[in-house]
Image (cartoon, helix red, strand yellow):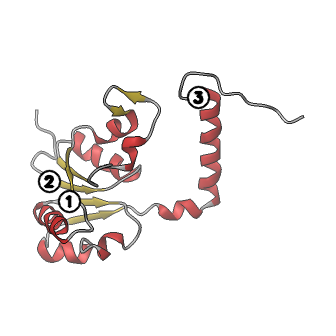
Amino acid sequence: MAGPLDGVLVADFSRVLAGPLCTVNLADLGATVVKVERPGTGDDTRAWGPPWSSSGSTYFESVNRSKLSVTFDLRTPADRALALELASRADVLVENHRPGALKRLGLGYEQVQAVNPGIIYCSIPGHHLLLDPRFRRRRRRRTARVRLRGASDGRAHEHHRRT
């Protein structure tokens, strides 16, 4: 059964958290999502675990299911040209790199819009959160929960109280 976004092509230049969650929702609604990854290591979240499944990081699998994947080294002119070709055919482009990073690579909104005037360009910058003290507090709480769950090898985490 086709979804409401059947026939929509999404160029997914996102990585880590918000971007992949956005694009997996588009894929779940029927869009064809092409995830762009680095050659070799791929998306950073391929290494996030535990938990792990037989094929890799369950986090990566959960936010990248139903997507196609390509690897482009955006530092090389040939792969940047391929990435721009993908963007020229896409209905939607989603990215969440540091502000200005894709522009420096020739894939900013103005550059993509020049070859694809109808593009919907979604930029989700979240790196400012790293400087936000509220984000750091949430991260510490999450780390505390991991300590309560135990070590990745199944052993209980030893927590020593200061006396």
Q: Earlier in the sequence, mark 1 or mark 3?
A: 1
Of pointers 3 and 2, the one earlier in the residue sequence:
2
Report the quarter where the C terminus lies. top right
- Residue at position x 64%, y 42% in the image: 141
Q: Is residue 60 above or below residue 41?
A: above
Name the residue beneath numbered marker 2.
Answer: 9
Along the polypeptide, which appears first: circle 1 or circle 2? 2
| Disc 1/disc 3 C-alpha distance (Å) | 40 Å
x, y percentage for residue 162?
85, 36
**Residue name at image x 17 percent, y 42 percent:** 30
Gap in Å between the C-alphas at discs 1 and 2? 6 Å
> Which residue type carries mark 2?
Leu
Tell me whether circle 1 and circle 2 mark residues in contact (CB < 8 Å).
Answer: yes
| Circle 1 residue | 92
Going by the numbered disc 3, the residue's amino acid type is Ala
Horizontal side, residue 155 vs residue 124: left or right: right
Which amino acid type corresponds to the residue marked 1 in the rendered image?
Answer: Val
- At which x and y percent is residue 157? 66, 27
Residue lying at 29% horizontally and 42% vertically, measured from the top left: 64
Q: Is residue 123 above or below residue 59?
A: below
The residue wearing badge 3 is: 151
Give coordinates of residue 126: x percent, y percent.
46, 60
Residues at marks 3 and 2, CA–CA distance in whole angstroms: 41 Å
